[in-house]
Every structure is written in C-alpha cells, then in structure tokens.
C-alpha cells in the first residue's frame, strides 16, 4: 500500500537529522576553545593591519 515505504523514509530522515544535530552540537561544544583562539588571531591580525 506504500505506507511502509513512507515510514522507512521518515525514519531514515529523522535518524539522519538527529545525527546531523548531534555532530553540530558536539562540534560547537568541543570546538569552543579552538574557535575562540582563531577569533583572537583574526582580531589581532585586523588590529595589526591598521
């Protein structure tokens, strides 16, 4: 009847979306120190150019 294919597609999409959100959160929380250090370097570079 086509219902099973819809359920499988929906489940696959939800799982893929959950993985994407988990990766984004872990990168955001785990990369906080790296991102702040990179931002400091960029700001120092902009200040030196003046």
Image: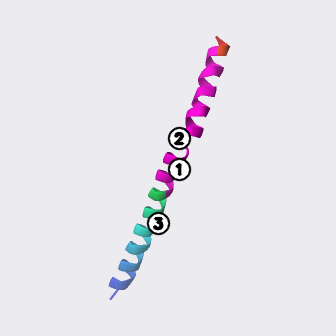
Q: How far apart are marks 1 and 3 (CA)?
A: 16 Å
Badge 2 marks a residue whose secondary structure is: helix
Left or right, residue 3 beside residue 30: left
Residue hosting label 3: 16
Question: Dot 3, how many residues are within 10 Å of its Cα: few (below 14), some (14-19), or many (20+)?
Answer: few
Which quadrant of the view contains residue 5?
A: bottom left
> Which mark identifies residue 44?
none
Left or right, residue 20 beside residue 48: left
Badge 1 marks a residue whose secondary structure is: helix
Residue appearing at x 53%, y 50% in the figure:
27
Q: Residue 9 placed where, x, y %? A: 41, 75
Q: Residue 17 placed where, x, y %? A: 43, 62
Q: Is residue 24 magenta?
A: yes
Q: Are marks 1 and 3 in contact (CB under 8 Å)?
A: no
Q: Which residues lie in the magenta part?
A: 23-47
Residue hosting label 2: 32
Looking at the image, is mark 1 or mark 3 earlier in the sequence? Answer: 3
Which quadrant of the view contains residue 33?
A: top right
Residue hosting label 1: 27
Q: Are marks 3 and 2 in contact (CB under 8 Å)?
A: no
């Amino acid at each position: 009847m086509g219902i099973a294919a819809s359920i499988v597609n929906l489940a696959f999409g939800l799982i893929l979306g959950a993985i994407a959100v988990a990766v984004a959160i872990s990168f955001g929380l785990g990369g906080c120190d790296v991102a702040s250090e990179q931002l400091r370097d960029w700001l120092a570079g902009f200040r030196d150019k003046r």
